[in-house]
Image: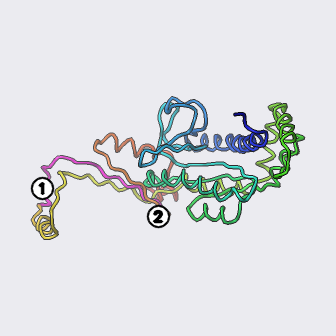
Amino acid sequence: MAESPAHQFGQMIGDVLEAAIEPILQSFATKYGLYLDKKGLRPARPGNKVSWTDGKENKHDLDFVLERGGTAAKKGIPVAFIETAWRRYTKHSRNKAQEIQGAIIPLIEKHKNHCPFIGVVLAGVFTDGALSQLRSLGFTVAYFPYTTIIKAFSVVGIDASSDEQTPDDEFAEKMRRWNALKPADKAKLYKTLIDLNEGEMKLFFGNLVKMVNRQIKSVRILPLHGAPVEWANIEDAIKFIADYREESTDKALLRYEVQIVYVNGDRISGEFGAKQDAIDFLKTYQTACKTDSEAVGGKS
């Protein structure tokens, strides 16, 4: 069944929002040595969608993911999960906020040791409650009001205003005008939309920069030797610890526990059975982060 002109129009505005944000994110990724995963073919994953799985292997399709150590052929460590959304009416805004929450929060739970940034760029009409709900969950929210959407489209001769009484033939005409635009006109619209919301973008990317540029306070390495032991009761466990020979070094290495501690209190942890895996993990943070002492010109 063909989509209605009204639905096509709403989808188009959502695509415009995504297209306006994409080059800014790409520039950010290049500047900070990150990989930007976006819709399109990528050897590291099947299909065109940006899909990540949560701890229960449920798949979630996203708009953008910034990765540390990622390449076209290999997924990296998630640095940021970023969603975009357009809604025309307040009655749909709460549901969209919950939809975004449902997609991102399970991924945060899986990747909590990496403390990724979570952000949303919303456009149109969203209630204060919907925006507050996302912010309370740790999202950085950039909100482009409905009026800025109308102004941005007006620079290319399209009236993007509508209401529930707007007939399909008007939406069809709006889509005809959109499809007739030259690439240069579309680029002008994207830039105008960002310029009209410059303040929101500065706050959004300011928070993203803080996350990427977190300064390392310390890196803790704990080599663990010997196999774990289990006891059925507290008394036997206490006896084991009391009798344990701490000076013994003849047990094989079990794993490396690595913890990166940041100045702001964030902690990123990993456990590795192989030495090279632990080294590779730390290398992904080697060029992207400075230690607290390096940041002030000292030595570690």
Q: Is residue 259 magenta?
A: yes
What residue is rendered at 18% in x and 51% in y?
Answer: 227
Assess whether mark 2 and mark 1 are in contact (beta carbons under 8 angstroms): no
Q: Nearer the viewer, mark 1 or mark 2?
A: 2
Name the foreground residue: 169 vs 98: 169
What residue is rendered at 11% in x and 60% in y?
Answer: 245
Image quadrant where one finds the N terminus: top right
Return the residue at label 1.
248
Q: Position of residue 10 (x, y in %)?
A: 75, 44
Local SS, label 2? loop
Q: Is residue 30 magenta?
A: no
Marks 1/2: CA–CA distance: 34 Å
The span picked out in magenta is 245-263
Image-based side of 91 in relation to 230, left or right:
right
Type of amino acid at the residue the image marks with label 1? Ser
How many numbered markers are drawn? 2
- Figure check: 181 above or below 220: above
Q: Position of residue 250 (x, y in %)?
A: 12, 49
Please say which color scheme the image uses: rainbow
Return the residue at label 2.
265
**Among the 4 quarters of the image, the one containing residue 199:** bottom right
Image quadrant where one finds the C terminus: bottom left
Q: Position of residue 173 (x, y in %)?
A: 87, 37
Q: Which residue extends farthest bottom?
A: 235
